[in-house]
Image (tube, rainbow, N blue to C red):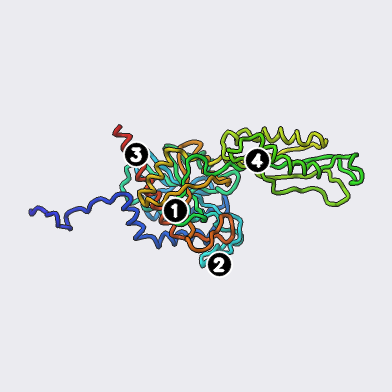
Amino acid sequence: MTKPTATDKSTVAAPKLSLREHIDDWLLRNESTLLEWRRHLHRNPELSHMEYATTDFLVGVLESHGLKPQRFPGTGLMVDLGPQTGPKIAFRGDIDALPITETTGLPFSSQHAGVMHACGHDVHTSIALATAVALSSYPLDTGVRVIFQPAEEVMDGGASQVISWGGLDDVDQIFAVHAEPKLKVGRIGVRTGAITSASDILEIRVSGPGGHSSRPQDTVDVVYALSLLATQLPGLLSRRVDPRTGTVLVFGAINAGYAANAIPETGTISGTIRTADIKVWRSIEELLRELIAQILAPTGATFDIRYTKGVPPVLNDEVATALLVDAARGIDPNSIVEAPQSSGGEDFSWYLEHVPGSMARLGCWDGKGNRFDLHQSDLVVDERALAVGVRLFGAVAARFAQAARADELD
């Protein structure tokens, strides 16, 4: 038999692509499909814990590529790729939408009245889906788990449920991106430490016997008591908590009374407490109860507090963030910018209570038109951000595998 020469293309195997090259090749061949996936999700948004059709769609796509996704109870799913033992990295995409009526006028606008992907979760989910499909045809050295999380937008967010269902079992690090319409497409916003804040809800119900406004001395002036809370509590809190923690109380609603000449028996005031410090988050309820009691003591009013814990701040791990930065710079040395610390909440924080990881801001502004905002009915994202996100996840997976191999050599 004649020995094949180096130029005999029919018998000499093509050199193996690097993971980054594989992702680029996949996007070159499938970017239109990626856009179709995103537009399907955008047209068909579903609210938290109601993402049944979204879950079915994702399962269908994954199974059509030979993968075996695992459904969570109710909605959401995850899929594992690569070796099932040894180091494993996870990526999170959130799949729920918001109760907002879309006003973008896009040809693929929401077909569900009063429901819209106004926080970019259709972008996150499409990136996660493309990552899973692209990696399914690559010989991975380390395990990869892609989580499609339900119910990120509600106080009892889906992240804690995913954890209870085993979503982080055997996972060493976890990563996510969040659409950022204030940041130009192609830019990746990173930050070590707190990138979001804890977000809790405080409602105070103030009570008294009520009475006529001509005789305030004979009753408890509930409206006056509420006013004291509105004006004094935020200021006192700022003197009891280190301002460097980014702790802020803002009241959004006061309700009391029905007539100008009647002092009501009850009234409520409610607002949000946000902080970037995990220690403050764990202790602030007790401090607020103390301050409220002190403010109301001279008025004679009684009070009840309903304090609803939200999510802790997203605290990006230093090592994981450095890995993400290295991965992004390998794609584009100029892509990385420092992300500001946000006062918004994100339940990705629950994952980081269990394993190290990092969330990045994904630029979605086209650089020319309006800078839109999240949770708004007119949000439009530059769809070029999808490919940026997929490349980033692929590069992070490659960098994670490289680090895992180095650990084995050590």
- Taking the spot 83% from the left edge, 43% from the top edge, the residue there is 265
- Residue to which mark 2 is pinned: 105
**Mark 1 or mark 3: which comes first in sequence?**
1
* Secondary structure at numbered mark 2: loop
Q: CA distance from mark 1 to mark 4?
A: 35 Å
Q: Is residue 127 above or below residue 202?
A: below
- Residue to which mark 3 is pinned: 403
**Mark 2 or mark 1: which comes first in sequence?**
2
Q: Which mark is residue 187?
A: 1
Mark 2 or mark 1, whichever is nearer to me: 1
**Mark 2 or mark 3: which comes first in sequence?**
2
Other residues around mark 4 within 10 Å, as few (<14) / some (14–19) / many (≥20): some
x and y, in percent, of residue 85 in the image: 36, 37
Other residues around mark 2 within 10 Å, as few (<14) / some (14–19) / many (≥20): few
Q: CA distance from mark 2 to mark 1?
A: 26 Å
- Residue to which mark 4 is pinned: 308
